[in-house]
Every structure is written in C-alpha cells, then in structure tokens.
Image (cartoon, rainbow, N blue to C red):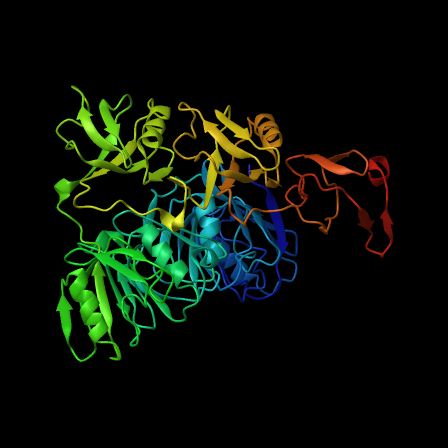
Amino acid sequence: MSPKCTISLPTGAILTAFKGSPPKVSGVSEDSPCHGLIKIGFTFIELTLGDGSQLTGVDTYELVAALNENAADPGRKITFEMTLPQSSTVTLAPGPAGLVIEEVHGKSTITKIEAFSPLKKELRIGMVVDKVVCEDGYEIQGGTSQEYNDLLDSSMTDPKRTIMLISPEVEPSPRKITLPKGTKVELPPGTCIDLGVSFMGTDSAKIQNVKPNSSVRGLRPGYNVHSLELAEGHSFIGLDGSALTHALDKTADSEGRIIYLKNPEFYQPPPEAVTKVMLPSDSNMQDIGLETRGSPARITKVTDGPMFGLLQTGYFIRTFGWMDGTSFSNLSTNELSEVMEDSVGLEGRYMICAYGKAPPSSAVTLTLPAGSLGAIFKGSPPALTRIKEGSCLGGEVEVGYVADTLTLPNGIKYYQMDTMEFTSALKSNADSEGRVIRFVDPSVHALTPKPYGDSSGAEMVDYKSVALPTGALGVTFKGKKRAHVSRVKPDSKLYSSLPVGMGVDTITVNSRVFMEMNSVEVADLVKSTSATPGRVMVVRNPDSNDYQKIPEKLEVVLPPGKLYCTFSSNPPVAKSFKAESPVSGYFPPAMYVDKLMMPDGYVQSGFNTRELV
C-alpha cells in the first residue's frame, strides 16, 4: 500500500486538476500554493473542513465543488494516498537533471532526486523513465538506465528536453532509438579523445559512443558520418571508422571543422571513399612528402609534411587541378609528378583521391561457424593455398586470396597478420561461432591499414562499460598493479562483450565505485558480490590516460540521522553499508576517516574506530 499525506490548504483556489473516481491529481499549476506538496498521481482519500466535517467517497465533480464552496475556509485539510501516476510528461531546462536513474526489476527507475533538481517538485521517486526526447529530435524509448543517464548528462546544454515517465506497474514501451534525418556539427579543436567521441564501421564511419562529458553538442551514437570538411578546403567523404578517427586526430589543431551526420535509415554510403586536399602552391610531390606508384597513380607512402594525416596509403589519385578549372584525371606516377612540378606557383591547386573499391568478387567477408576452418595458409599476409573437402570456404573464396582482417566474437580485430598470428587466433576461438574474416585479392586490394598507427596486430577499443551478470563470470584477471582481462571462457555470459587485454578501470556495486585494483582485489570483489544484481565494470585500453584514481582527500557532508554503515581498522575505514544507508555512494573504498567536523566548528582527528563511532 502506498504512503499517505495530509496537507493543510490555504484559502482560495489551489489550482490543482483532478480526474476520475476516486479523484486522482492530473495536474498542478506552477502558481498553485500547493505546488511541490500535491503531485500528479496522488489519489484523493478525504477532505476535512474547519468545523471537523469530512468528505469521502466522492468523484471528481463532487470534490471540486466542495473545494470551491469552502475556498474561504482556513481550516481545510486534504488527505491523499501517495500513488504514482500511470504516465506523466515533464520538460527539463538546460543544466543537470539532478536525477539518479537505476535498474529496478529491469526498469529504468528514478531512485533519487537531488535537492538542486529543477524537477524535484514534479517528479517522484519510483517513477519509471520510458522515453527522453532532445530538442534536435533524438530520442531513446525503452532504454536502459545507463543510456538515460548518459543522454541527460550529454544534453545539458539543450534548451529543452522532454522526459516521459510511467508507473512501475505499466509495461515500458518497446526499445527504440530515433535519430533526426541528418545534421551538421561544428567541431572544436581536439582529438577524438578530447571531443569524447569514438567511431566504428569498416564501410562507412558510424558514431559508436559519445561520452557524457563531451563538449560537442549534436553528436549521437548511431549516426553515419557522411563527410568531414575543414576550413582550409580539405574534405573527406565516406571514410570508415578508423580512417575518420585518424583524420580527426591529425587535424586536431584546426578551427572550423564541420562533420555531416546522416540517419542510417535514410543514408546510402558513397560507392567509394573520396578525399580532397588543397595543396601548397610552392611544393612538388617530394616537398609534400608524397610517394606514388603505378598508373593511375596510387599512394604508397605519406611522410611527415603538410599532407601527413590528410592522405592515406592505398588511395588512387583521381584528379589533380587548380582553381581556374584546369584538371587532369587518372595520371600515372610520372605524369602526376611532372604536372605538379610544372604547376608550382599556382594558387588553388587540389588533389582528389579515392580508395577505389573493387568488384565484390575480389573482397569476400565470411562469418565462420564453430570448428576448424579446413584450409591451409602460408606467408605474410596469410595466403590461402589449399581448401580441404568440406571446408566452409569452399565455393566462397578463391585460392590465392589473403586474410585481410579477422574479427573475434569478443570484438577484438586483427590487421596485417602473418600466418602464425592468424591461425593462432582462429584456433584459440575454434569453439565459438561468429568469427569474421575478410579475404581480398591481393592484386586488386591493399591490406586494410592498422588503426591509429598501432604496431600490434589487434585493434583494442578505448573504453567499454559492461554489465556484470550474477553468478560466476568465467573471467580470469591478471596484473599486480592494475588488473586486466586475461581470459574469457567460451561459455561465459561475457564472452561476446568483454574484450581480452582490457584494463579494469572501475567496478560499481550498489552505487559504490571501486577503482585502482589489482587482479586479486578484482577477483575477490567479483566473487564476494556475485549475488548482487546491477554491477557494472568499466574497462579501458591499457595505454589509456583516463583511468579513475582514488582521490587524495575527500570531504563528505553527513546527513542527519543514522548512517547505517560499519567502520573497522585503525584508522577507521567504512567496510559495509546497509541498503538504506544515505552515504553508501559517497565513501570510496579504501579511504579512511581522517577528520570529523561538527556543525559548531569542533574538529576531532587521530581517532580509532571505537572513538569515531
């Protein structure tokens, strides 16, 4: 049964709307003298007048009539059952929402409303977030608590955000993420890490993740990136995720970069990636650090210079020209070098390059079943030399093709492998379905370049948040200083979502965030909380500089009443918290209590656990 409340009503209109029988509060005006006391969803129980008479069991019409007839009575009191509304819609102004949204029984539920929240008089703890709509049309419906928290944090500069809420008794809407058809976003200077955005995609770049604290408004996960334009006149169309990341990182100092985003439902990627670069007027091929080969000229190397980071190896030079309309197409290496030399001194010179996608038959991507591949490979890169009878490659791949990339079910991707590295990765995951190999004809395709200039074979994501199931994880951790994921068993529930090799940044359990742990500490924590739902582990690239650290000093304001926590050791350390503890999320693990300050300014320090308690 829901709790009850009795509210003393001032004289005059209370500017509150009711509907139904029994009457339920359907709206409260911001000008109401009871705004913040009476809330949408409350169910009427009784009205007590100043003379002691009571009104119960009435419908909305009778209640409103009684309130109006007795508006001058200063002794009126109204009693409600504090029920939640079936549905409600609120508008959120710019700034932090001040809401804590967590998973409760599989629903994204408001579990705390901060004192500074602009919605504290409109919302109720226990209401379920069903949809959030941003001003640009981006919306998440039926999302997870993490998605809603991230969206509200990342959209704090939006002039208006709309939140749709439902009662926990109501079934949430089916999951749906809606993007606007397209938009353009101006990017400030900075690398992808500085901007708080990451990209994915092998054919066309797509926004994979936007950090909640990103300084760029309008970036949304799921958008395809059609093009990137620079103020200097450079443009990039149809780049894949790694190439776009490379281009953004190499142009991090540029002002006025514009990125054009498209909803994937309405977007058809271009047939080939195209890059246009503006060339210095006083430079030849050698001066700009460009080396090419063949006819038409194909870029084989870009050394340090004005074109480094703008042009990529493997691209064909389709067009060379300058601003008066003169242009040359598909020049050979010698012809291109001659024309560039002859045009030194002309303003507005440009070069248009394209990756030149070959016919589908020369590039084959296969998703493998579990088991042996049934084929023989040799050399570097791994060249297919023989296909055994019954192999899943039979009729799909030609002998002589090479393995370009290998993607494992846990998301790790390998580039530019030799045969030993390729076959070892295949064998270590032989029991798993979902391994993906891209084969290419080496006479047509260059190998896919390694992302970010990485010298290792495998691509590792920068950051990933993983929800931990209850029970055994089937994960092995190693590391004396910082724990990293050493192995994920094939039968683990995390096999397809937790990449091997990633470092453990934080583990959140019941609002407490554990960080800076070695493998033993991680294993002990995971085991001791195996029955606790809602745990979240954040893992990062081992080379990341964004790992969270335990602060040197932290001040916590204690609320009145019991803390419901247990201290131990000398000096005192908070070891455990009850579910109703109001401070469980504010005491970082491993920090000890150094000083206690009373409201009157009295300070005590250097105490043991008994003296503190």
Residue closest to the eye, 51 or 459: 459
Residue closest to the eye, 540 or 445: 445
Residue at 16% in and 32% down: 397
Q: Which of the 4 image quadrants contains residue 365?
A: top left
Number of callouts in the render? 0
**Outermost residue to the top:** 389
- The percent position of residue 527, horizontal first and vertical second, equals 58, 25
Answer above or below: position of 445 versus 248.
above
Task: Classify the position of the C terminus by image quarter.
Answer: top right
Could you tell whether 540 is left or right of 381 in the image?
Answer: right
Could you tell whether 412 is left or right of 67 in the image?
Answer: left
Task: Classify the position of the N terminus by image quarter.
Answer: top right
Answer above or below: position of 6 versus 323.
above
In this view of the protein, can residue 108 be seen by the observer?
A: yes
Could you tell whether 123 is left or right of 203 in the image?
Answer: right
Could you tell whether 312 is left or right of 124 in the image?
Answer: left
- The percent position of residue 233, horizontal first and vertical second, equals 29, 72
Residue at 61% in and 34% down: 518
In this view of the protein, can residue 565 be seen by the observer?
A: no
- The percent position of residue 572, horizontal first and vertical second, equals 79, 38
- The percent position of residue 202, horizontal first and vertical second, equals 28, 47
Residue at 23% in and 46% down: 446
Q: Which of the 4 image quadrants contains residue 343?
A: bottom left
Q: Which of the 4 image quadrants contains residue 229?
A: bottom left
